[in-house]
Image: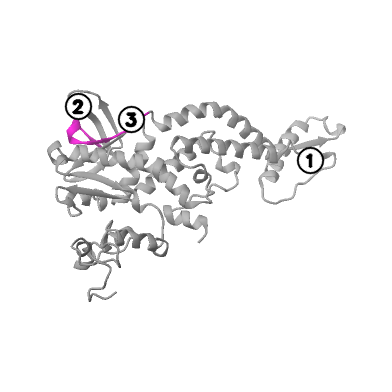
């Protein structure tokens, strides 16, 4: 399987950054910056949207609770969990004001906008909350909501500051690119044609209608009158201006990726060592955001006494890397053989269905994968159960 195909499987959506730059794709000088931020934030948000949000009680993992349903199945009537998590993470990474999640009738909603009044002792207050086109005319206290915010300086603000230095350079490169890649002509008019009362009118007619239509058409015929000659000329090195623009784009993408802690090769869409790059991406870009989400949910849902008993929420990032069953077979076997996971837990890692059989919940250990309790009780001593070697 090719590298690009693996990347597509990993994110379920491949963004190809290797396409050539075209004039129609450049709407404003901020396009590269906005695109770089969008791609970086989307990489992380799409990765976390694949994760399971696990909830634990004093008796262990609980996947039958209302909280589990809201964060892993359907947070509200209009969204599924992956859409909700994708939107949540994207806003965490791009909105300097943070993200407000409110509950209404047992459902979760992400606020489009809000006003936050900070009170360090009594707790923050949130007003002017809007959900898409719905304004909520009430005040929310901190213990009524979940509020997600990166406490360091917002990454998008850092990229915006960096772009102030690159803006002029991009303006210059873009102007050169547009100038060198546009069609320009000069009209040669013989001296005996520049006199006469109708010359100015005729000249404007030729320039504004005939030449304009001829230049903008995909194909056509230009009637060239005696004494007039239309000449096409080049303005510079088209390839040089194009290369300058592409290099500036690469710089912005690399700096933006560094700010979000995303490997350079991912931002360029050119990955060679998929496993190493993805592991770096998960460790430095995804895990901090996943930890933040789990911590906020735990803090806002459970009391201190509940937390002491083991109540908590965890965003499981182990399902992010793409791997086939055959690639993971040896590793899974070792996990089962050393009591790290039971067969059903191993199946879950591989994305396979749960099997409702007692032996699938059993833990095994080495010595031909015998039951752990048998080994501990001394029933397996290097011989078969019949006592033979």
Determine which of the numbered discs, if any, sits on residue 146 in the image: none
In screen coordinates, is 160 left or right of 289? right
* Dots 2, 1 in contact, CB < 8 A: no
Determine which of the numbered discs, if any, sits on residue 123 in the image: 2
Instruction: Name the residue: 41% across, 65% down.
Output: 326
First in sequence, mark 1 or 3: give its number: 3
On-image quarter of the C terminus: bottom left
In screen coordinates, is 6 left or right of 95? right
Whether residue 138 appears in magenta in the rendering, the answer is yes
First to last magenta residue range: 135-152
Instruction: Name the residue: 34% across, 51% down.
Output: 318
In-front residue for pair 387/96? 387
User: Label 2 crowding class (10 Å Cα cut-off): few <14, some 14-19, many 20+?
Assistant: few
Q: Which residue is at the far left? A: 305
Which residue in the structure is indicated by mark 3?
151
In screen coordinates, is 31 left or right of 288? right
Instruction: Name the residue: 29% across, 66% down.
Output: 369
Which residue in the structure is indicated by mark 1?
230
Q: Nearer the viewer, mark 1 or mark 3?
A: 3
Callout 1 secondary element:
strand
- On screen, 373 above or below 238? below
Whether residue 20 appears in magenta in the rendering, the answer is no
Quote the CA–CA distance across marks 1 and 3. 63 Å
- On screen, 315 above or below 322? above
Q: How is the image coloured?
A: one colour
């Amino acid at each position: 399987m090719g590298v690009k195909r693996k990347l597509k499987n990993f994110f379920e959506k491949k963004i190809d950054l290797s396409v050539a730059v075209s004039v129609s794709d450049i709407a404003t000088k901020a396009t590269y910056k906005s695109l770089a931020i969008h791609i970086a934030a989307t990489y992380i948000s799409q990765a976390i949207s694949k994760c399971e949000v696990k909830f634990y009680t004093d008796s262990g993992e609980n996947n039958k609770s209302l909280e589990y349903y809201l964060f892993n199945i359907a947070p509200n009537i209009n969204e599924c969990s992956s859409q909700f998590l994708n939107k949540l993470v994207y806003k965490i990474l791009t909105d300097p004001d943070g993200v407000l999640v409110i509950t209404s009738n047992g459902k979760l909603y992400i606020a489009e906008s809000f006003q936050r009044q900070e009170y360090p002792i009594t707790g923050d207050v949130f007003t002017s909350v809007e959900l898409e086109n719905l304004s909520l005319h009430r005040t929310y206290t901190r213990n009524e909501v979940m509020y997600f915010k990166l406490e360091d300086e917002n990454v998008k603000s850092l990229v915006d500051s960096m772009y102030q230095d690159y803006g002029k350079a991009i303006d210059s490169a873009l102007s050169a690119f547009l100038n060198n890649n546009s069609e320009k002509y000069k009209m040669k008019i013989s001296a005996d044609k520049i006199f006469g009362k109708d010359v100015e009118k005729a000249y404007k007619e030729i320039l504004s209608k005939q030449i304009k239509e001829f230049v903008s058409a995909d194909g056509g015929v230009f009637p060239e009158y005696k004494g007039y000659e239309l000449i096409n000329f080049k303005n510079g090195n088209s390839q040089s201006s194009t290369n300058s623009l592409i290099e500036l784009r690469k710089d912005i993408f690399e700096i933006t990726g560094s700010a979000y802690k995303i490997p350079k090769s991912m931002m360029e869409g050119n990955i060679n060592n998929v496993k190493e790059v993805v592991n770096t991406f998960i460790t430095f870009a995804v895990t901090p955001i996943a930890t933040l989400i789990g911590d906020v949910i735990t803090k806002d849902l459970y009391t201190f006494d509940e937390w002491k008993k083991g109540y908590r929420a965890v965003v499981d990032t182990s399902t992010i890397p793409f791997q086939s069953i055959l690639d993971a077979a040896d590793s899974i076997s070792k996990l089962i053989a050393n009591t790290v996971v039971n067969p059903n837990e191993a199946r879950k890692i591989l994305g396979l269905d749960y099997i409702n059989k007692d032996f699938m919940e059993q833990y095994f250990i080495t010595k031909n994968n015998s039951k752990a309790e048998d080994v501990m009780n001394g029933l397996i001593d290097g011989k078969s159960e019949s006592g033979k070697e």
